[in-house]
Image (tube, rainbow, N blue to C red):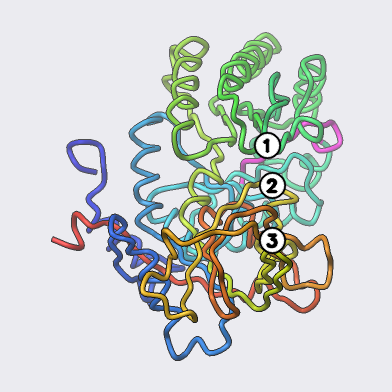
């Protein structure tokens, strides 16, 4: 870290380049202030090796570094445990590990992936309140010794298969109703369930070392953190009254989004911690951000594979869609935006700035009419083999894609870039 609290970009790049998941792969420097990303993607498209014109991602590792800088500067007392479920790309995971992140894993497969990158089991929280017994057994064998629970049945499973595991009682955030993806209907102990659950863990001889909550994925009401931290404080007090050893972990979950809303969310978190945990000595405060680190770091390129004109309406088919990367439209309630890249049309300006635009519909490649990516979207006149570039495509996109109709989301290639013009373009 530099004297201003930020990392040295060259040192960060060297650190990431040597990490598992990135080591041995080509990382291309780009100038983020001069359409460097678009130029890089155009270079990939024009590469003679890209004959089949398949969709591809670009991961900008410079964005990841900047986001970690922002997190460390804004929430210095809260350690991020990246939520693997958001995007399990190996290069992203390797970069996060190199930058000092821990990991929120929800399954045996996610734990295996993270351990395979050389991450210590101590840097993993098994943050799934309801786990298959086989996965609990696996966690015990590899030394992942911190997990969440919100039911008596989970207490019994852990007592039986991993009695040395430290527990975080997962509580329902009081105010999670405006999250993009609310989690309260599925997970989290209600206030009147907390004491019985603590007593059940106590009777089972298990160690409850802290409290966990999640205000919901993509929550736009950052004040929800304050109410949840207040509720967590009440649980700490209840545990003390019941004779528990002092709990040492507060997990404030996820829900963070990069951009303008992050400072507001961080401000609410800091204020709530000062109010409810003013003496935090000996308290480990962690979080489970996924979207914050993954969303803006990835850009997707999809090829126009078909076109139909109906009056003033333009209809296009692309080779990725709802059953692939754009599943986020259904499952993550995302709003997509794109930039045209008219490579096949040989325009002087491939981004088509200033050209006449038309109401356009963009379909995905499968035979399901549900596979519709954009409707009423203004686009210039495009042709088959032109491209659309979709920004902010790193959160709950490739992670939840399928192989429906034989279009394999997991086969989409990811190219690595690093944007930092101040050091790479002196």
Q: Is residue 66 left or right of residue 193?
A: left
Residue pointed to by mark 1: 180
Q: Could you say which disc has been placed on residue 332 in the image? A: 2
Q: What percent of the width, then of the height, locates residue 79?
A: 45, 37
Q: Residues within 10 Å of mark 3 (few under 14, many from 20)?
A: many
Q: Earlier in the sequence, mark 2 or mark 1?
A: 1
348 magenta-colored: no
Q: Is residue 19 left or right of residue 222?
A: left
Q: What percent of the width, then of the height, locates residue 366?
A: 78, 72
Q: Earlier in the sequence, mark 3 or mark 2?
A: 2
As rendered, which of 325 and 113 lies closer to the eye? 325
Q: Residues within 10 Å of mark 1 (few under 14, many from 20)?
A: some
Which residue is depicted at the point 36% across and 70% down? 39
Q: Is residue 190 left or right of residue 292?
A: right
Whether residue 143 is visible to the viewer of this picture, yes or no, is no
Q: Are marks 2 and 1 in contact (CB under 8 Å)?
A: yes
Measure the C-alpha gap from mark 2 to mark 1: 7 Å
Q: Could you say which disc has been placed on residue 361 in the image? A: 3
As rendered, which of 280 and 416 lies closer to the eye? 416
Whether residue 228 is visible to the viewer of this picture, yes or no, is yes
As rendered, which of 232 and 31 lies closer to the eye? 31
Q: Residues within 10 Å of mark 2 (few under 14, many from 20)?
A: some
- Which region shows up in magenta? 145-155
Measure the C-alpha gap from mark 1 to mark 3: 25 Å
Q: What percent of the width, then of the height, locates residue 62?
A: 35, 56
């Amino acid at each position: 870290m530099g004297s201003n609290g930020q990392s040295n970009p060259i040192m960060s790049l060297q650190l990431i380049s040597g990490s598992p998941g990135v080591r041995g792969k080509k990382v291309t420097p780009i100038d983020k202030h001069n359409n460097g990303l678009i130029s890089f993607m155009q270079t990939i498209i024009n590469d003679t090796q890209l004959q089949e014109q398949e969709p591809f991602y670009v991961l900008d590792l410079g964005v990841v570094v900047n986001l970690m800088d922002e997190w460390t500067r804004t929430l210095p007392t809260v350690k991020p445990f990246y939520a693997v479920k958001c995007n399990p790309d190996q290069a992203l995971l390797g970069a996060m590990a190199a930058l000092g992140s821990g990991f929120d894993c929800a399954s045996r497969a996610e734990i295996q992936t993270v351990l395979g990158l050389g991450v210590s089991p101590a840097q993993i929280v098994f943050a799934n309140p309801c786990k298959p017994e086989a996965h609990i057994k696996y966690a015990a064998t590899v030394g992942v010794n911190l997990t969440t629970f919100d039911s008596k049945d989970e207490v019994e499973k852990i007592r039986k298969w991993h009695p040395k595991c430290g527990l975080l009682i997962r509580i329902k955030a009081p105010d999670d109703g405006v999250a993009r993806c609310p989690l309260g209907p599925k997970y989290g102990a209600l206030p009147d369930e907390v004491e019985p659950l603590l007593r059940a863990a106590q009777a089972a001889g298990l160690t409850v070392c802290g409290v966990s909550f999640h205000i919901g994925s993509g929550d736009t009401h950052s004040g929800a953190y304050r109410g949840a931290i207040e509720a967590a404080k009440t649980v700490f007090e209840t545990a003390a009254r019941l004779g528990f050893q002092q709990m040492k972990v507060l997990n404030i979950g996820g829900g963070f989004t990069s951009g303008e809303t992050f400072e507001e969310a961080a401000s609410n978190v800091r204020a709530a911690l000062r109010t409810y945990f003013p003496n935090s000595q000996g308290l480990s405060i962690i979080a489970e951000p996924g979207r914050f680190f993954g969303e803006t770091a990835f850009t997707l390129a999809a090829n126009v594979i078909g076109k139909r004109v109906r009056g003033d309406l333009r209809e296009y088919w692309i080779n990725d869609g709802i059953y692939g990367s754009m599943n986020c439209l259904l499952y993550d309630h995302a709003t997509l935006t794109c930039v045209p890249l008219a490579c096949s049309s040989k325009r002087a300006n491939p981004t088509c700035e200033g050209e006449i635009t038309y109401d356009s519909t963009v379909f995905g490649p499968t035979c399901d009419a549900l596979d519709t990516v954009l409707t009423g979207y203004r686009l210039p006149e495009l042709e088959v083999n032109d491209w659309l570039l979709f920004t902010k495509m790193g959160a709950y996109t490739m992670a939840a894609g399928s192989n429906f109709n034989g279009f394999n989301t997991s086969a989409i290639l990811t190219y690595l870039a690093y944007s930092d013009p101040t050091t790479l373009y002196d």
